[in-house]
Amino acid sequence: MTQIKRAILSVSDKTRIAWFARELDRMGVELISTGGTYKLLKKEGIKATPVAEVTGFPECLDGRVKTLHPKIHGGILADRSKPEHLRQLEFQKIKPIDLVVVNLYPFAETVAKNGVTFEEAIEQIDIGGPTMVRAAAKNHAHVAVVVNPSRYEGIIEEMKDSGGRLSYQTRMELAREAFEHTAKYDAMISAYLSRATSSEKEKPREDHFPQEIKLSLRKVSELRYGENPHQAGALYAYDDPPMGSLVSARKVSGSALSFNNILDAEAAWSAVIEFDEPACAIIKHNNPCGAAIASDLKEAYLKAYECDPTSAFGSVVAFNGTINEACARALLDNFIEVLIAQEFDDDVIEILSEKKDMRIIEMGNKESTIRKGFDLRHIYGGMLVQDYDTDPYQESKWKLVTKVAPTHDQIEDLLFAWKVCKHVKSNAIVLARNGATVGIGAGQMSRVDSAMIACEKASERARGCVVASDAFFPFPDAVDRVISAGALSIVQPGGSVRDAEVIDLCDRKGVSMLFTGIRHFRH
């Protein structure tokens, strides 16, 4: 084992670096340092040599070039087992460096700031730091590299116990951690540049997707199990998760979320943030079993619950606003697995705590949940990548295809049903009236089966309803079913070879129909 006699310290995260440097100094380790780290050590009275004195060359180009010099990298990369390397060090008057303590510019924190410019982000791309880290990790047989401040105490203890040395096992583990650190860092930069280029409005379609996508994820928590008890599960987050996402949300109370809880919570929150009005979505098995908008959240919940009270038992419930006392008390009569809201009034959590089994999640600013980047779906051996399903919901561009036109109130309900339909598993049929779903048919292999289920759920409430279908009607049968149940107006993408038959049926029954030209499959 090589005794650590000389170390270079250059850290962005300065947590406990002064303590670590002081302990190294007490063991007689010569310290080299750069920039802000050197200033901190000097302020703390810890002796260190600025890197410019070692290289004989001043920092230049606004600090872009500091450590990129043979007297630094030769000292790190020399293979101490090769006499020729040692002779070259002696000839070039290069002293070996035995310990590299480096962590990198805060790129993720910089690009997460509101209003950060592209130029500011680029300046946070570290060059010298990753180069030193990789060099030391490559030469871990002779050099130790530390990128994580939590390692400091253990390293000092081991050095004290072994006469200033670190075992090969420790150096190997530190090297693995170092390469993980630089890989994550490069992945963050790659992801940022991918987002920056994909947002260019003039970008050709064939260049829309990057040739490679690097993912950098950190484990947030272990889950009790996956979708089923025999499957292990865990939650991971991107290094810079957006505020208003489940991985950055605040769990106010309740036990840990399960794998299925998280999937349903994501579906619920995605549904309610579609609306500007107070909205509630009740999710069961990743599908809405009720959704509504109203003048306040309590009314929205009661309307959504009425759609399918049986399925609402043991559900995930989401609101796009602040839960007040009246709304909270209305929730107490139902068994809710997970309750999600933008915020909660101060006195509400105490009321809701009566429900011991309910997990309560505060999401924060819903505006920040606008989906950016790409929607990734894992398949065995790879990923499917697509844009997020966004829709400007410009009903003014919808096409009236029947002789009868919908009323103003019906148009409002059609728009509501169309927004909900986007969040229902295809084949999706949504029946709605007065800003609330009255029947939902989801995930069936045929559209007519979904229509039958939606009508059965709605029963007499289907009279006077409107209908949204996530894709075109391949046959008139599903249309005939919802009209027979009492539907007065229908919205759908259009585009079937049998559109004329479907339109003719509506005209004969006196029902209005609009084409959106946009499909909303959700698989």
Image: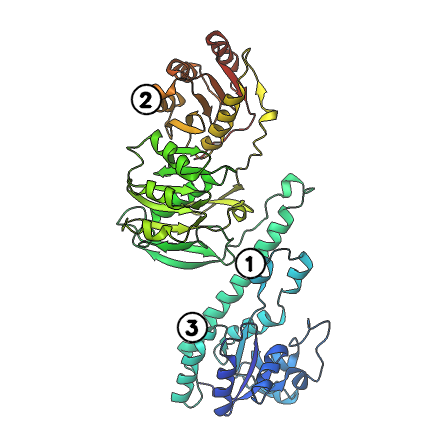
- The percent coordinates of residue 87 (x first, y second) are 60, 88
- The percent coordinates of residue 164 (x first, y second) are 45, 88
Q: Amino acid at mark 3?
A: Glu
Q: Earlier in the sequence, mark 2 or mark 3?
A: 3
Q: CA distance from mark 3 to mark 1?
A: 23 Å
Q: Which mark is residue 456?
A: 2
For the question of whether residue 502 can be seen, the reply is yes
- For label 1, the SS is helix
Q: Residues within 10 Å of mark 2 (few under 14, many from 20)?
A: some
How has the structure been colored for display? rainbow
- Locate the C terminus and report the quarter of the image it occupies: top left
Q: Which residue: 53% across, 54% down?
A: 214
| Front position in the image: 202 or 293 | 293
Q: CA distance from mark 1 to mark 2?
A: 49 Å
Return the residue at label 1: 188
Number of callouts in the render?
3
Q: Amino acid at mark 2?
A: Glu
- The percent coordinates of residue 88 (x first, y second) are 62, 85
Mark 2 or 3, which is nearer the eye?
Answer: 2
Return the residue at label 3: 173
Q: Residues within 10 Å of mark 3 (few under 14, many from 20)?
A: some
